[in-house]
Image (cartoon, rainbow, N blue to C red):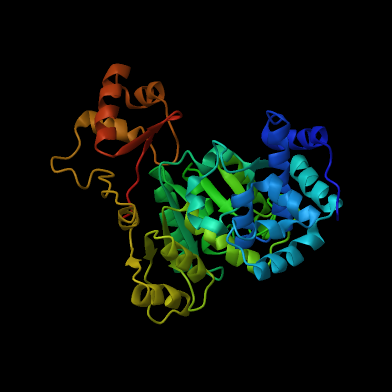
């Protein structure tokens, strides 16, 4: 045996800060701790581990690994002996008590939550990855952000983005967030960072998927951005805290971006850009795929043109076209599409609202000089027409790209 697991009581105590409370019983503590251990042992997307854990459960799979008895499970788990031997050879060098304790302690100090299948916060969309689905997710920020969004779009693209690409990312990110869509990306320089910043500026939630542990900012230049994302949404990884981002983990991380997004849009990408890897995962999952066209002379858009020509991506040039990927009707969004134009009261209410700040009804009434009852009636009509949005913070205008 390479390591000795702590007592059940110690497991429960170590897990308490990661779960906002102690596990319900000893069996639950052992299950959760085993999942955390497996996340330390395996690389993201390890299908052999996925099959074993799915077949045996995390506790039993870990026990058999430690006892050298995993060969008993190969038939039921649909794992060949060669695959099992290769897996054990990968996992055993990491089965060290100090490394396991360090990952859990780092998560506790960074106020990171451990989310596992079956939790209310678990995003069912990642289960579409099958054997390659994450065994757990480490979340900094609000875990509810993973499941409470009505709709979500992955916006991805090149790190070495042009001004054109960043402009499109900014408009798409802000407008989607303004419509209540969660913007998902990878927090990299270029298109990713611009999309996150635009969503935050519009007051919307955004999710950042990292290739390393969520306790460490990568890239380091986005440390402040990642703090803001964690405050408004969530920073997520399947790699435990302390884990370093590697090339393989970046490629594997892309499958989570594609799975969590109901559709993926590549804004700008070179011919061999990593964004095409995300697009490939989206296509494999049956998710709608869009690409933004660019100048035919621009190498930074060659990957998008490749997606349009070879991979049947949809050409998207406006946010309405992005929303069509979700099957949404184009938003009426403002005054341009109203045949008779807004009434005087509607104009006053719209003038009292912005697309960037939520305002409560009494504040809107004060700003436009109408009675609260009259304002409530106008707000209801404007909401039905799609010109404004409402949530627990109040009302906000839907901006329209022109």
* Residue displayed at 60% across by 61% down: 47
Say left or right for 202 vs 379: right
Does residue 264 appear anywhere in the picture? Answer: yes
Q: Is residue 339 above or below residue 219?
A: above
Viewer-proximal residue, 69 or 271? 69
Q: Position of residue 272 (x, y in %)?
A: 51, 78
**Rendering coords of residue 118 (x, y %):** 56, 39
In this rendering, the count of numbered labels is: 0
Q: Nearer the viewer, residue 314 or 200?
A: 314
- Image location of residue 384, percent across then percent down: 25, 34
Q: Is residue 242 left or right of residue 219?
A: right
Q: Position of residue 314 (x, y in %)?
A: 33, 66
Which quadrant of the rendered structure holds the N terminus?
bottom right
Q: Quadrant of the C terminus?
A: bottom left
Left or right, residue 337 beside residue 269: left
Q: Is residue 216 something that shows in the picture? A: no
The answer to which image quadrant residue 394 occupies is top left
Q: Residue at x 49, y 62 (%)?
A: 156
């Amino acid at each position: 045996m390479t390591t000795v697991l702590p007592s059940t009581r110690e497991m429960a105590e170590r897990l308490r800060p990661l779960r906002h409370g102690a596990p319900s019983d000893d069996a639950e503590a052992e299950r959760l701790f085993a999942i955390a251990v497996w996340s330390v042992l395996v690389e993201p997307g390890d299908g052999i581990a996925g099959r074993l854990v799915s077949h045996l459960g995390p506790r039993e799979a870990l026990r058999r690994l430690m006892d050298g008895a995993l060969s008993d499970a190969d038939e039921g788990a649909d794992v060949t002996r060669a695959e099992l031997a290769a897996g054990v050879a990968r996992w055993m060098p990491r089965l060290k008590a100090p490394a396991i304790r360090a990952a859990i302690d780092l998560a506790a100090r960074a106020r990171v939550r451990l989310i596992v299948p079956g939790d209310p916060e678990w995003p069912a969309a990642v289960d579409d990855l099958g054997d390659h689905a994450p065994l757990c997710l480490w979340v900094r920020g609000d875990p509810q952000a993973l499941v409470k969004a009505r709709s979500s779009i992955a916006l991805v693209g090149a790190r070495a983005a042009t001004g054109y690409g960043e402009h499109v990312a900014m408009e798409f990110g802000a407008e989607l967030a303004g419509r209540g869509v969660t913007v998902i990306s990878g927090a990299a320089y270029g298109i990713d960072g611009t999309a996150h910043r635009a969503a935050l500026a519009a007051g919307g939630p955004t999710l950042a998927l990292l290739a390393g542990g969520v306790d460490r900012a990568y890239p380091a230049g986005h440390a402040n951005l990642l703090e803001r994302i964690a405050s408004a949404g969530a920073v997520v990884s399947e790699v435990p805290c302390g884990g370093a981002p590697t090339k393989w983990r970046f490629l594997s991380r892309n499958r989570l971006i594609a799975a969590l997004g109901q559709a993926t849009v590549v804004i700008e990408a070179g011919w061999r850009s990593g964004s095409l890897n995300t697009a490939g995962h989206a296509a494999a999952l049956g998710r709608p795929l869009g690409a933004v066209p660019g100048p035919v002379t621009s190498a930074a858009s060659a990957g998008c043109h490749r997606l349009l020509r070879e991979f049947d991506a949809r050409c998207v040039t406006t946010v309405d076209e992005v929303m069509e990927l979700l099957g949404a009707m184009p938003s009426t969004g403002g005054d341009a599409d109203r045949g008779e134009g807004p009434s005087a009261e509607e104009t006053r209410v719209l003038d009292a609202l912005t697309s960037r700040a939520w305002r409560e009804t009494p504040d809107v009434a004060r700003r436009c000089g109408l009675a609260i009852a009259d304002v409530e009636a106008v707000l209801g009509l404007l909401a039905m027409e799609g010109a404004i949005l409402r949530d627990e913070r109040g009302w906000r205008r839907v901006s329209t790209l022109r």
